[in-house]
Amino acid sequence: MGAAEPPGDWVAALRGGGAEQDAAVAQLHGALLRVARSELNRRQGQLNVSGPELDDLAHQAAADAMLAIVAKLDRFRGESKFTTWAYKFVMFEVSSKVGRHYWRTPPIALTAEDWDRLPDRFGFDPAGASERRDFVRAVRQAVDDDLTEHQRRIFIALVVDGVPLDALAERLGTSRNAIYKTMFDTRRKLRASLVADGYLDDEAVRRP
Amino acid sequence: MSGWSAFERFLRTDPADVGCGGTMEVMDVYAELAVADRPAAAARYPGVAAHLRNCDPCAEDLEGLMTVIRANGHGPGGI
């Protein structure tokens, strides 16, 4: 016996009630789970799990995606296929699970604040001790002088310590969007500060 | 590009950037367009394209969604 045909109208089927709704929910859940498994496998380099643990993450992502889909069904406007719209929630949930998983074995503590790593993140020559030192001094000064405490915390976690954005959002109990917005403002502030201090100009980089 | 140049590039912001929220809202539409023609998707949604250049997590989600679309074929309502 082959797989059941997908509903012609997913939204109606998911709202329909009775056996039709049950069938649509089961069918969609099966599809979300397959996509979650596939996406977690694609991102396996960001995780250090496999087998049943990976499958457990897939089940969590599929279940949470289903909750989001049902809650937001009114917002599906038919501009994409329903399944594409639904699968994007799997992507968001997989990202969230990967972010949460990061803290099980974090490579660095959130409070590490290891400024010596910063030059490597931007490809400074390991042998250029003087330039590396000047860079750290200039950025650190701008961070200390011009950022709010919240901006400073986000900058250090993401840029100095290299914590993934979704992992930081999970740890701080906030959203990816909120962290990104903070970093957006932080980048603008730091740029203005480093331009004002003569380290950068608008078009090209000028050495101090 | 490395050193100060890389850092300067990292600090650049694009006023057109719609942020993660704006990108997530249309990611399904953008992904379907991008599978067929990525430059056309960027042209239709320049603010999303600006965001994707600077936000690795959103770019990763888009890549995942495009991978699923390519792998699952098409057809209205198809899984």
Image: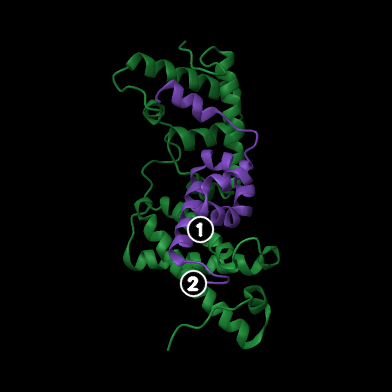
Chain colours: A green, B purple
Answer few, some or many: residues within 10 Å of disc 1's Cα (few below 14, many 20 plus, some between 14 and 19): many
Question: Residue at 36% of width from left, 28% of height from top?
Answer: A120
- Work out how far the residue at label 1 is from the one at label 2, CA to CA, in angstroms: 13 Å
Counting from the top left corner in percent of width and height, residue A66 is at 57, 69
* Label 1: element kind: helix
Residue toward you, A37 or B36: B36
* Residue A56 image-quadrant placement: bottom left
Chain letter of the residue carrying label 1: A
* Residue A184 image-quadrant placement: top right
Residue toward you, A87 or A189: A87
* Residue A197 image-quadrant placement: top right
- Whether residue A55 is visible here, answered yes or no, is yes
* Label 2: element kind: helix
Taking the image as shown, residue B57 lies to the left or right of residue B20, namely left
Which of the numbered marks, if any, corresponds to residue A91? 1
Residue toward you, A43 or B17: B17
Counting from the top left corner in percent of width and height, residue A24 is at 58, 79
Q: Earlier in the sequence, mark 1 or mark 2?
A: 2
Q: Amino acid at mark 1?
A: Met
Where is mark 2, residue-wise? A31
Question: Residue at 63% of width from left, 77% of height from top?
Answer: A14
